[in-house]
Image (cartoon, rainbow, N blue to C red):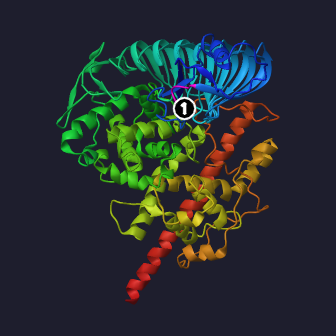
Amino acid sequence: MTKEMETETTSIENDKQTKCGAPETSETAEERKNKKFVSRAESLNLHLKVRPDSDEQPENDGVSEPPGLLTLAVQRYEGETCEGQFHGEGVACFKGGHVYKGMFSQGLMDGHGLFTHATGLKYQGEFVSNKLMGQGTYTWPDGSCYTGEVYNGIRHGIGTFQCPKNHVSYRGQWNQGERHGKGTAYYNEDKTSWYKGDWVKNNREGRGVRCYPSGNIYSGEWKNNLRHGEGVMKWLKQGQEYVGTWQDGVQGKFTFTDGRVFEGEFVDDQMMTPSLRAPTSLGAFIMSGSHLSMLGPDMTLSIECLLDKIPERKRDTECKQVEFVVLRQDIDLRSIYSFYSRLGHAHSSDNTFLLSRLQLWRLLKDCNIHHHNITLAQIDRFIREDAGSAEIHSPFTPILLRNLLSCLVIVAYHIYHKDMILQKNLLAACLSRLLTDDILPNAKNVKGFLFRQPHLAVVALNYMKRCWEVYQADCRVRTGSADDLTMTCRHLLWMFKDLQLLDHNLTTAKLMDIITAESCDSSSRSSCLDLEITFLEFFEVLLGCAEVKCQQVCEVLEEDGPLARSDSEAMTHQPEMEASEEMMNATMSPSQSSEDLTAQHVGSQDTKINLHEASSSAEHTEDHSEGNGMQISRMETKDQEVELRSQTVHHFFNHIFFQAFDHHQLVTRIIEEKHRQEA
């Protein structure tokens, strides 16, 4: 916020009753007064005016305007004199409460001094014949200050202005009280928001660089505080860049990352007129419902379920804006699709795969979508029509690129629509926030027990089909549904109790640790009991349990080929949390009579296989971590570890889990048959 200093002519009048301390001469007192303070004195310039900096700054900085015209009459003077005139060092007190303390010369304020206005405004610096002239410092009552060159009481030359109230500062050239020339302005306390460049009469005008609080940067031409002319805008988080012409703050042309060029109207930095041209056939339009889509056939959105919630007159605009968001992130979204579609697959000749629902679930969990009070099972229901599968929770359902994009739009709406309700284009705003805050920063950082280790994932997926049959069978028994097959964490606990899989290694507490490994608040495990879990979460719990249950296999294999692990690696497993038997009894169903087919284990209760934190970074990321300091060669150790984990998975499924499930099914059928015979 600026405080302008403008020149006003005033006179310093000496009160008739003022005692100057000098002897009387033949001249009358009135003649001496006129000679000293009227005929020879120049005016004291001290007129303040508050002017807002720009639309980026508050309109009021809380500083009251002092009176525009000061007529100073001396009431009292203490100090040195010469020939009846104020001369040397002295203090003058004026009517109205103003005070000057400093140097005088022949009755005039001249030299270094401090003038304090009755309102609290102070000027300390150089005076020349009653004029504020040279180097000086203005200090306002709110703490704002200016230090630099002053001419006739006005900021003029090089100077620095600072306002601690709103953390605005400016250093650079001034002209007649206004920022004019070259200068740098900071707009926040951290100095992450700034402008450096040309100024014309307090406005950003000419060429300059503007850094916004978000980190986005514009470099180019300005006019009247707006981006105007040729310039470059970089959106850092989105990885986007606009190079071209600006008019009154908005673009005139936008080039997408795939080479397509938008030319048309921008309103509030959003594209309003669908006019795309492309160097190839990528620019062809296709029909999506009643809307002319700018996306290719592999990216056509199916979001009618959301558009029905939008007033009909706004649907076309909403759809266009969503498509623009997708186009801006085209390369990143395709890269994410390709990355996740390869999870769990050995390399193929062309290395191209279709994304499955199982991999879609992993993408959503890696991006912490389930931390927004929404489950993967709920998302399956939201995209049910678009997926086009009778089994809405099947992990084998293929997900095309357009299905993924539609899913992200739908998920974004359900997560953020309440926060973005005031946005002009609701769906586009929600999608942009989801991509910026959740998807782009977290995708490709694979978590969980399945895909985190690529070689182990290939082995584990050999058991996926049979595990899916187990999952379906248990869901049908507990839910009675034919197609909406899900289970809750509580149901999973019941399954492990019924199959008698819990023992001194796999305790209730350990099982709950595995189940809640990726939850938003793993410390509040009881709150997760009734949450639905999809097959991915079920399958990853089994893999986590395999590491715990099969320590005997580890002991045998480690005797044949011990792994030299560092202490730090051995401590990467999640600490087991205490769980009371009361909680277990409250969640368990009465178990049926059956044999305990669980393999008996020997050794200590300490888990020998690491139960890695599900939130740790995946091996299956684009940047692999450095070695962990093993004593033998890294390659040999890795091969041994892969073999160890593979044997663990084989042993758990073939000798523990499937046998326990088959036995339980057999016993259940025998009991049911017996009940029918008795009936």
Where in the figure is residue 159, as x and y percent of width and height? Answer: 63, 16
Q: Nearer the viewer, residue 249 or 364?
A: 249
Where in the figure is residue 539, as x and y percent of width and height? Answer: 52, 53
User: Could you tell me which secondary element the residue under label 1 belongs to?
Assistant: loop
Residue 317, placed above or below residue 160: below
Is residue 571 found inside the magenta-colored segment of the image? no
As drawn, which residue projects farthest toward the left?
A: 290
Q: Quarter of the image containing the C terminus? A: bottom left
Residue 559 lies left or right of residue 287; in this view the side is: right
Residue 444, placed above or below residue 176: below
| Residue 127 seen in this snapshot | yes
| Residue 392 seen in this snapshot | no
Task: State the image quarter where residue 91 is shown.
Answer: top right
Label 1 neighbour load within 10 Å: few <14, some 14-19, many 20+:
some
Is residue 68 found inside the magenta-colored segment of the image? yes
Q: Nearer the viewer, residue 375 or 373?
A: 373
Q: The disc labelled 1 sits on which kind of residue?
A: Pro
User: Residue at the spot x=63%, y=77% of the render?
Assistant: 582
Q: Nearer the viewer, residue 566 or 637?
A: 566
Residue 624, placed above or below residue 416: above
Q: Which residue is mark 1?
A: 66
Task: State the image quarter where residue 638 is shown.
Answer: top right
Residue 678, placed above or below residue 668: below
As drawn, which residue projects farthest toward the bottom?
A: 678
Q: Give the dominant element type of the magenta stretch: helix, strand or loop.
A: loop
Where in the figure is residue 465, as x and y percent of width and height? Answer: 45, 51
Q: What range is drawn magenta here?
A: 65-71
